[in-house]
Image (spheres, rainbow, N blue to C red):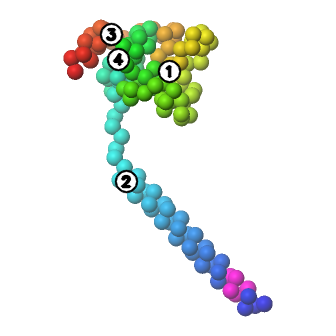
Amino acid sequence: MAQQSAVISSVNEQATAMAVAWQLKHITDQAQRELNRAPKRPARCNLCKGAHATTTCETIPQQEKLPLLKTKGLCVLCGNYNNHHPVTCHNLRTKNHGELCHKRVCGKKFELHHKNFCTLKQNQLVEGNLNVQQLLMEDQDQ
């Protein structure tokens, strides 16, 4: 009986040592992947070319955002140039459903868009607005 309990405790010690070694390897591999990952490029607005995300743009007047997105061929859910259909947009596949417009009027019109692109939003203008026609001309020049 004593011999059997010694074998059991020996097996338990080896199993514990192997588990610790595996966890340590997992942690170091994960840290190495993080170190080797390329740094994220800074956000750039596709509407005004500012140094912010397209969904947070405050330079363009609110009423002009959605039409400008459509004119430039941008996704109305994420504001990117990915040339994807809104059904395949990452905003629908991830936890960002809260960022979609949930206004009843938009839903009745079947207009699916990001809440910051909604034309019904009340805060219309911010100081330093750019002329939308000028932005469209700049895009055509590029």
**Residue designated by label 4:** 72
Q: Does dot 4 land on a helix, a strand or a loop?
A: helix
Q: Does dot 2 land on a helix, a strand or a loop?
A: helix
- Of mark 4 and mark 3, the one earlier in the sequence is 4
Q: CA distance from mark 1 to mark 2?
A: 33 Å
Classed neighbour count for the residue bearing mark 4: other residues with Cα under 10 Å, few (<14), some (14–19), many (≥20): some
Span highlighted in magenta in the image: 5-9
Q: Does dot 3 land on a helix, a strand or a loop?
A: helix
**Residue designated by label 2:** 35
Residue 11 visible in the shown view: yes
**Residue designated by label 3:** 132
Q: CA distance from mark 4 to mark 3?
A: 11 Å
Q: Does dot 1 land on a helix, a strand or a loop?
A: loop
- Residue 69, given in percent of the width and then of the height, sits at 39, 16
In this rendering, which labeled residue sits more in front, label 1 or label 4? Answer: 4
**Residue designated by label 1:** 114
Number of numbered discs overlaid on the protein picture: 4
Check if residue 61 falls in the magenta segment: no
Residue type, mark 2 in image: Leu
Residue toward you, 128 or 78: 78
Residue 56 visible in the shown view: no
